[in-house]
Amino acid sequence: MMKFIDLSVVVNEETPVYPGDPPIKIQPAGVFAKDGYNDHLVSIGTHVGTHMDAPLHMIDGGKTLDQISIDQFIGRGRLVEGLDMEAVKQAGIEAGNIVLFHTGMIEKYKDEAYFTGYPEISEEVANYLVEKRVKIVGVDMCSPDHPPFKIHKILLGSGVLIIENLTNLDKLIGKEFKVYALPIKFALDGAPARVIAQIK
């Protein structure tokens, strides 16, 4: 029997945003008691909550999400415990995999330290993942790197998509799984995404 794990955080007005980004705003556009239906106007950045980065995010002239083949959003998952090269090589990464890095940082999601004290993926690891021709790199952090965002540029510049702010990766330890990472079809640099893992 297949089991599904939701790897996405909840989005509401309390959802933390990257320093300098505008907060999420949600306003009623229709109220059932008055209008006979409920509706809302949502103001949200393209890089808030669990979201996907398209190449255009860091590559001038790069592809937008609507230009990415949907095949790239689905693939066999590989979980890496930590960020070092030894852990990466032990994960058995192959071409077409979606590689998820479990660091535990998401546990500090609502703390200021989440956006300032997170570790980084090394250039060595990023280049290794590009050489392996993976589809996506996902992290349970706000970013795989700090300014000037070299890791973003290595991955996105090679067509490897990035997912940030993943949760529940601890539930994938020791499991074989498939990842479905479906962003809103924005013709933009990124979008919120619903990411789930299907465990065998």
Image (cartoon, helix red, strand yellow):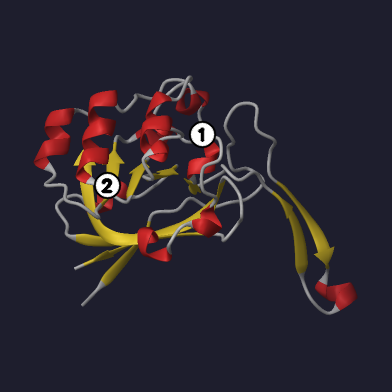
From the viewer's perspective, tell me whether residue 71 is left or right of residue 193. left
> Is any atom of residue 144 visible in this view?
no
Residue 146 placement (x, y as % from top left)? 44, 22
Relative height, residue 151 to residue 39 (above, below): above
Residue 68 visible, this orientation: yes
Query: At 37% from the left edge and 59% from the top edge, which residue is drawn?
Result: 72
Residue that numbered label 2 is attached to: 99
Q: Viewer-proximal residue, 159 or 146?
A: 159
Disc 1/disc 2 C-alpha distance (Å): 20 Å
Write down the quadrant of residue 80 in the picture: top left
The residue wearing badge 1 is 58
Residue 116, how many percent across, how many down? Answer: 48, 21
Q: Quadrant of residue 178?
A: bottom left
Residue at 59%, 36% (x, y): give it: 17
121 lies left or right of 163: left
Q: Position of residue 199 (x, y in %)?
A: 23, 65
Residue type (three-letter) at the residue carrying disc 1: Met
Asked if residue 133 lies left or right of residue 195, the reply is: left
In the depicted structure, whether residue 75 falls above or below residue 149:
below
Residue 183: % across, % down: 50, 58
Identity, as a three-letter code, of the amino acid under mark 2 = Val
